[in-house]
Every structure is written in C-alpha cells, then in structure tokens.
Image (cartoon, rainbow, N blue to C red):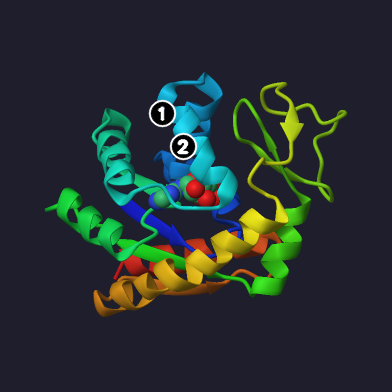
C-alpha cells in the first residue's frame, strides 16, 4: 500500500520517475497532465477548453482538477495505492486531497529538486508520444524516426513547451506550488531528493527514501 505524491518543477523528472515507481510498486501513475492531454486528444468540449489553459501555461480551476482526481482515485486500480504526478499544485488542491483521501491518507510526498536553469534546458529538449505519453528527449530519442518505441505513436514536442508557457508555469510553481513543500513538511510527509543526476540514479534515491519511510 503506497500513496505517493511527486512534487517538483516542470522538467524535474516527475513523469519519468512516476512511470518507474508505478512499475516498481505495481500501482498506477496518475498524471493530471496526461489525463488532460488525453481529453485534448479526444477532442471533447472540455478538452478544447483545457487546451486553452495549457497552451498558455495557466492552471485549470481547482474545482475542475479536484473533480478529475477524485474520479480517478476512485477507480479500482487505485485502491492499493497510486503515484500522483502534477497534483496537487495549489493549497486548495492539497487541502481537497487531504479531505478526499480521508482515512487512507498520502504516505509520502517526494520533492524532486532541480534548479530552474536546468529544467528550462530539459524542457526545451523534451519530446512526448502523442498516443501513450511516453517521454523522450532530443538526447535520448526513440530508436526510429520519432516513432514511439512503446506504441508506435508520433513523438513530438508538447504544444505547451514554448518559451512563454514554460516561463509562466515556472512562475506559477514558485507562487502556488512551492508553498506546498511547507504544508507537507509540517505533516511530516516530505522527503526532498536531489534530482540532478541520471534517471536511474534519481530513481534509486527516491526508492531509498520511500522505502525508508514506509518501513519505519
Ligand atoms: P503537466 O503535464 O503536469 O506539466 O501539466 C500540463 C498542464 O496541465 C499544466 O501546465 C496545466 O495547464 C494543466 N494542469 C495539470 N495539472 C494541473 C493541476 N493540478 N491544476 C491545474 N492545472 C493543471
């Protein structure tokens, strides 16, 4: 039973690490960004509205995001645990998460710490599969011509990885999301992991921190 939240700037490696942790612990990777990108891909009215926020680097309204996460965490595959990536991003979302998890609270919150100038560089080289969300970079592309190794989908740059949207997301992170570190530290749930290393090494650091917590 592991309920994890990953915090950290965009480009800190949350998506990559969440995928690995999900495989290791056998629990779902719940990425609000991926859920929204799926809605965009399906072309619903909601998806079109969401894309407007996302392309500007703005946050969707808290009540909308809380509803999405509540529905997702109620699915049977999340009963034994999950890895939340991209949520909560505001104090209101964090309070709502406390409420909706009730007597099955979050166990550990991992902050993946990577300096701003490094994430800007990482985001500019980031590429993603439009179909399954698998992550690549210009330094580690798929093996054949921007075709996803996992599902054969097209691998592209995210529409919201433009310079303006990235700058806006990073500013919102400082203003609205960083205060959550204090919130979770005061609950005794926060571990900070230095994210300035290869993905394997960062993964080993996170696993050591999480396992240390869970077996105390
Ligand atoms: P991400 O993939 O986590 O970088 O999320 C991509 C975009 O989706 C964000 O820039 C926001 O526009 C939106 N988004 C994702 N998660 C949230 C959230 N918890 N609250 C508000 N907006 C979100």
Side of 112 where 151 appears, left or right:
right
Residue 19 appears in the rendering: no
Q: Determine which quarter of the picture holds residue 76.
A: top left
> What x and y, as percent, mark residue 126?
73, 49
Side of 131 where 54 appears, left or right:
left
State yes or no: Cβ of the residue under disc 1 lies below 8 Å from any atom of ligand 1: no
Q: Determine which quarter of the picture holds residue 78.
A: top left
Residue 3 appears in the rendering: yes
Find disc 2 in the rendering and name its residue: 50
> What x and y, as percent, mark residue 90?
35, 62
What residue is rendered at 29% in x and 71% in y?
216
Q: Secondary structure at mark 1?
A: helix
Q: CA distance from mark 2 to mark 1?
A: 6 Å
> What x and y, as percent, mark residue 53?
49, 44
What residue is rendered at 33% in x and 44% in y?
65
Side of 54 where 139 appears, left or right:
right
Residue 183 vertical position relative to residue 80 in the rendered view, above or below? below
Q: Residues within 10 Å of mark 2 (few under 14, many from 20)?
A: some
Q: Secondary structure at mark 2?
A: helix
Residues at badges 2 and 1 in contact (C-beta under 8 Å)?
A: yes
Residue 13 vertical position relative to residue 82 in the rendered view, above or below? below
> What x and y, as percent, mark residue 193?
52, 72
Q: Residues within 10 Å of mark 1 (few under 14, many from 20)?
A: few
State yes or no: Cβ of the residue under disc 2 lies below 8 Å from any atom of ligand 1: yes
Q: Determine which quarter of the picture holds residue 155.
A: top right
What residue is rendered at 64% in x and 36% in y?
134
Label tally = 2
Find disc 1 in the rendering and name its residue: 46
What residue is rendered at 26% in x and 79% in y?
186
Residue furthest right as drawn: 145
């Amino acid at each position: 039973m592991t309920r994890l939240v990953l915090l950290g700037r965009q480009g800190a490696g949350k998506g990559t690490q969440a995928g690995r942790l999900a495989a290791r612990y056998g629990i779902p990777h719940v990425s609000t960004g991926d859920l929204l990108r799926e809605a965009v891909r399906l072309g619903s009215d909601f998806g079109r509205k969401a894309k407007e926020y996302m392309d500007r680097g703005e946050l969707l309204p808290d009540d909308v995001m809380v509803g999405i996460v509540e529905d997702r965490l109620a699915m049977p595959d999340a009963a034994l645990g999950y890895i939340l990536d991209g949520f909560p991003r505001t104090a209101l979302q964090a309070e709502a998460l406390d409420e909706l998890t009730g007597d099955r609270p979050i166990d550990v919150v991992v902050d993946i710490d990577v300096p701003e100038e490094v994430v800007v560089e990482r985001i500019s080289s980031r590429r993603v599969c439009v179909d399954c969300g698998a992550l690549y970079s210009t330094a580690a592309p798929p093996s054949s011509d921007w075709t996803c190794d996992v599902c054969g989908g097209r691998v592209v740059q995210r529409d919201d990885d433009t310079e303006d949207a990235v700058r806006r997301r990073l500013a919102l992170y400082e203003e609205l999301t960083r205060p959550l570190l204090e919130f979770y530290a005061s609950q005794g749930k926060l571990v900070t992991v230095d994210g300035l290393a290869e993905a394997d090494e960062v993964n080993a650091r996170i696993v050591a921190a999480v396992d240390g917590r869970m077996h105390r």
